[in-house]
Image (cartoon, rainbow, N blue to C red):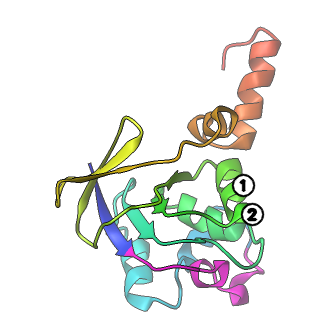
């Protein structure tokens, strides 16, 4: 089970996730420190490592809208967060897939901060409320990239398999 550590509404832009003033920082190992930088309390929890890997951010519609900055996905990947949203902005979703960030499309999700979620059999179960919500699966090829840890890891694995090497 995973705990909801942040509940957000609709239209959360990449500038909220990763403010533009930090755009000079692009290395994936440096971007996480700026996750939700304008939410000082939440950012501090992340930086103090008080948020375990696999923790969940729940959001409404159009999560990751705005600019196409890849850092918005890499900053969340740096903490190994899971993002459950009613839907995602197209470019953010593709950046997330490429980086191996676990994203779950759940159009009817209902959860509050502190709730415990379980991901099973094509649905999200809020074990705190006892309600279950259907998810929309990503296409198999996109899910395979996430499962491999991102596009680079996926490609490396495929090349090694093609060449008869063990990944």
Residue at far top of view: 164
Q: Secondary structure at mark 1?
A: helix
Residue at image position (37%, 74%) is 6
Name the residue nearer the viewer: 24 or 110.
110
Q: Secondary structure at mark 2?
A: helix
Q: Which residue is mark 2?
A: 91
* Mark 1, other Cα within 10 Å: few <14 / some 14–19 / many ≥20: some
Disc 2 to disc 1, how far (Cα)? 5 Å
Residue at the (43%, 90%) spot, across then down: 40
Asked whether the residues under the numbered discs 2 and 1 touch, taking CB atoms below 8 Å apart as contact, a structural biologist would say: yes
Identify which residue is drawn at 28% across, 72% down.
Answer: 112
Q: Which residues are magenta?
A: 7-25
- Image disc number at residue 55: none
Tell me the quadrant of the picture where the C terminus can be found: top right
Q: Residue at x 36, y 59 (%)?
A: 55
**Vertical arrangement, residue 137 with respect to residue 104, above or below:** above
- Label of residue 94 in the image: 1
Q: Position of residue 160 (x, y in %)?
A: 76, 19
């Amino acid at each position: 089970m995973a705990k909801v550590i942040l509940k957000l509404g609709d239209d959360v832009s990449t500038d909220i996730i990763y403010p533009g003033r930090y755009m000079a920082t692009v290395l994936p190992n440096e971007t996480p420190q700026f996750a939700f930088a304008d939410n000082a309390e939440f950012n501090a929890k992340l930086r103090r490592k008080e948020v375990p890997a696999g923790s969940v951010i729940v959001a409404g519609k159009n999560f990751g809208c705005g600019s196409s900055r890849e850092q918005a996905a890499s900053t969340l990947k740096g903490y190994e967060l899971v993002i459950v949203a009613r839907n995602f902005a197209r470019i953010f979703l593709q950046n997330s897939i490429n980086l191996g960030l676990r994203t779950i499309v759940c159009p009817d999700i209902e959860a509050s901060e502190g709730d415990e979620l379980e991901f099973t059999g094509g649905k999200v179960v809020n074990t705190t409320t006892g309600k279950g919500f259907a998810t929309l699966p990503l296409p198999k090829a996109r899910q395979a990239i996430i499962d491999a840890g991102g596009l680079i890891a996926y490609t490396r694995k495929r090349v090694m398999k093609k060449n008869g090497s063990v990944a």
